[in-house]
Image: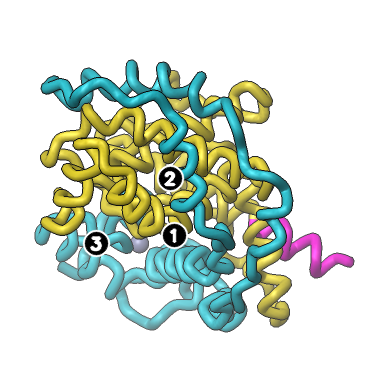
Amino acid sequence: MNEQPAAMHAPDLPELSAYLDGELDAGGRQRIATHLAGCATCAAHLAELQALSAGFRALPDEKLGFDLAGVIEGRLAHLPRPPAVRRRDWWSGLPVAIGAAASIAAGVFMGSTLVAGSAATAPRMAALRVFDTMPPGNLCIGLESCYVKGSVK
Amino acid sequence: MADDAESGLIARAQAGEHRAFAVLVRQYQDRVFRFILRLVGARDEAMDLTQETFMKAHQALPGWRPEAQFRTWLFRIAHNTALDVLRRRQRIEFVSFSDLPAGEEDHALPDPARQPDERLADSQSIELLERTLQELPAEHREILLLREVEDMSYTEIAATLGIAEGTVKSRIARARSAALAGYQRHTGEHRDE
Ligand SMILES: [Zn+2]
């Protein structure tokens, strides 16, 4: 178990990334967890991915800033009555309907006065601090299996 | 799969009840807007495209089936709407990886030693991250938004973008790698100033 083939230390980013997202099956999860426990390089890479993820989640929560539903309702009221709902496969209908809708949607858009209402939301910034508190890379956590070139001091 | 309350609303909207569709719009307008805003960059344009997305969704509503998750269905329309504009603008720079031999894609992460060694103000970090995001190819920016901001699973992302789950996995990994490299380039620039 401690004997890791050198090739495994080349980080397989998609695996690490999917591990972060909780998208691996139980076997894959276990395999990565075992490797991470013994490899500071991969652990540092995972920490980077986590910090990036936390950073994206800390981006300001942008809001439209007005009630679009009311605008849409007003526009729909002025559309010609749609034909009765036809039974058909939903995805065969989708692209056709979208194409057809494009011309309709090109009509009246909201005035620029509506723009004024958008409120800036206080960003959830704490998560970004992870970037700054992360240890410098290649910090060996001291396990025997961590023998990547340059990582063992 | 849409929940019961949502399915009910959709069914009523399909039957022509505008008030029911308005409730759906109200539920999703901010999520669709922030996705499109970060995709196209400009606020006014994002507002127009958000409205266009819902008008298209209303038009396509007769084709919606309860088997489809409403959110991914709606985001797929938003994706198509925004990408049309990006293509027209020719700002889109899809990176093609299909010509790379299998298993030889560059999955290497940026050198961790290039981590910023000084604390950046939070607002500055966010600004750099926003800038980094805007500089990514649209394809990378979009999948990161769906994963990190919209918190979609790989299955949901695959349905939204119309790609295989395996592609979702590899594209997210590449997008993260590119984002890290971009962010670290910016923090490096900041340090040198
Ligand atoms: Zn490793």
Please, which chain is the residue tagged with disc 1 on? B
For image coordinates 65% across by 47% down, the residue present is B134
Residue where numbered disc 2 is placed? A73
Residue A28 in percent (x, y) is at 16, 56
Does the magenta run of residues contain B186?
yes
Q: What residue type is labelled 2?
A: Glu
Please, which chain is the residue tagged with disc 2 on? A
**Chain B colour in the picture:** yellow
Q: Which amino acid does label 3 sit on?
A: Gly
- Between the residue at mark 2 and the residue at mark 1, the CA separation in whole angstroms equals 28 Å
Q: Which of marks 2 and 3 is nearer the N terminus?
A: 3
**Chain A colour in the picture:** cyan
Residue where numbered disc 3 is placed? A22
Residue where numbered disc 1 is placed? B149
Is residue B100 toward the left or the right of residue A93 in the image? right
Q: Give the range drawn in magenta.
A: B183-193
For image coordinates 55% across by 62% down, the residue present is A63
